[in-house]
Image (cartoon, rainbow, N blue to C red):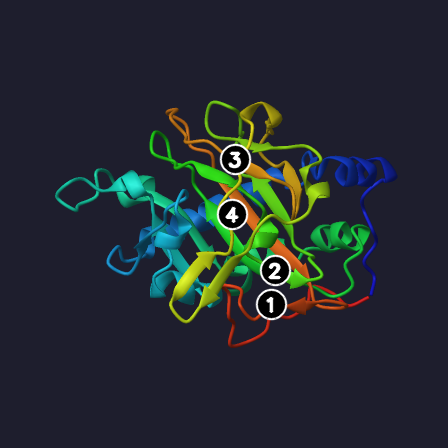
């Protein structure tokens, strides 16, 4: 196989204790430049009429057919606050997009090359993955002034396997801090298990339980420099606040699940026609 585990015992201990881990300088400046340039090219070429609005607060209202079909293509989603009362964009489309997803890792050569790299595979091997697949990817913009809040959630709610195996890999393409909407998490919250699931049924998508109320004092900010990777346990509670600053907070997010020793839930929102190729098989 040739893939070597690349997390230290101290890193693994921190991850299992806190439910997240920061790896500084995971991406090189050249890799960051390549992904940002590629996204600039994709944005320049896309047609605003073939897109959708994504709510980071009420995701049950964000799941039209365009969203549901995005699991196997590259789709564009606007910020809720991007449009004026007349229905037109308040500013250029490049400053109005919330995210691009959910298969950049599969269909774009630049993002695929980075997502398939051995450093990702080595990280996943360290975490015990046997036959991992990248199930979704997103380029998140967190636009200046309008970048929406992402409410507290767990990744396993949306990408459920039995038993649960989802891990989020969140790469900062710009410095992320409390001013421009960095991640926040409740350390150790993954030990309490999964709270609720996001299901897809005949009448659309829905949560099977209401959201719990969390104490804001329990969250800690995860401020990172560009190039840092935040590894997020699928059960850890995390969020980000609205970006009210004049600076964006670009990030590339990849979510993986295992396909060995577990079963992908058929009532997940992602229903693929073609199954992804594994990153490796151990």
Residue found at x 59% / y 42%? 171
* N-terminal-most mark, 2 or 1: 2
Residue tagged 4: 35
Residue tagged 1: 265
C-alpha span from label 4 to label 1? 31 Å
Of 40 and 158, nearer the camera is: 158
Residue tagged 3: 213
Q: Nearer the viewer, mark 3 or mark 4?
A: 3
Q: Position of residue 32 (x, y in %)?
A: 55, 42
In this view, 249 is above or below 269: above
Q: Nearer the viewer, mark 4 or mark 1?
A: 1
Q: Is residue 45 left or right of residue 140?
A: left
* N-terminal-most mark, 4 or 2: 4
Residue tagged 2: 160
C-alpha span from label 3 to label 4? 37 Å
* N-terminal-most mark, 1 or 3: 3
Q: Contact, CB < 8 Å: mark 3 with mark 4?
A: no
Q: Position of residue 189 (x, y in %)?
A: 67, 38
Q: Is residue 215 left or right of residue 40?
A: right
Which part of the image, by quadrant, shows the N terminus? bottom right
**Quadrant position of residue 70:** bottom left
**Quadrant position of residue 166:** bottom right
Q: Residue furthest bottom?
A: 273
Q: Contact, CB < 8 Å: mark 2 with mark 3?
A: no
C-alpha span from label 1 to label 3? 26 Å
Residue found at x 41% / y 31%? 242
* N-terminal-most mark, 2 or 3: 2
Does dot 1 land on a helix, a strand or a loop? loop
Crowd class of label 2 (few under 14; some 14 to 19; many from 20; radius 10 Å): many
């Amino acid at each position: 196989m040739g893939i070597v585990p690349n997390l230290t015992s101290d890193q693994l201990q921190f991850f299992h204790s806190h439910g997240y881990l920061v790896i500084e300088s995971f991406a090189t400046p050249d890799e960051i430049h390549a992904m940002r340039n590629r996204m600039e090219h994709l944005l320049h070429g896309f047609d605003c009429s073939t897109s959708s609005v994504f709510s980071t607060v009420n995701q049950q209202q964000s799941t039209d057919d365009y969203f549901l079909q995005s699991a196997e293509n590259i789709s564009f989603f606007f910020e809720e606050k991007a449009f004026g009362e007349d229905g037109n964009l308040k500013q250029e489309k490049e400053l109005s997009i919330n995210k691009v997803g959910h298969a950049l890792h599969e269909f774009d050569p630049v993002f695929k090359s980075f997502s398939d790299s051995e450093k990702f595979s080595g990280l996943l091997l360290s975490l015990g993955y046997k036959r991992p697949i990248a199930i979704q990817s997103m380029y998140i913009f967190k636009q200046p002034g309008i970048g929406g809040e992402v409410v507290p959630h767990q990744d396993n709610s949306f990408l459920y396997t039995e038993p649960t195996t989802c891990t989020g890999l969140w790469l900062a393409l710009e410095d992320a801090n409390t001013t421009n909407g960095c991640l926040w998490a409740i350390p150790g919250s993954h030990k309490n298990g999964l709270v609720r699931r996001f299901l897809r049924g005949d009448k659309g998508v829905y949560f099977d339980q209401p959201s719990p109320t969390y104490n804001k004092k329990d969250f800690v900010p995860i401020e990172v420099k560009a190039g840092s990777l935040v590894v997020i346990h699928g059960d850890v509670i995390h969020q980000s606040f609205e970006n009210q600053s004049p600076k964006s907070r670009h990030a590339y997010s990849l979510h993986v699940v295992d396909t060995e020793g577990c079963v992908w839930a058929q009532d997940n929102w992602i229903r693929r026609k073609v199954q992804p190729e594994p990153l490796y098989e151990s």
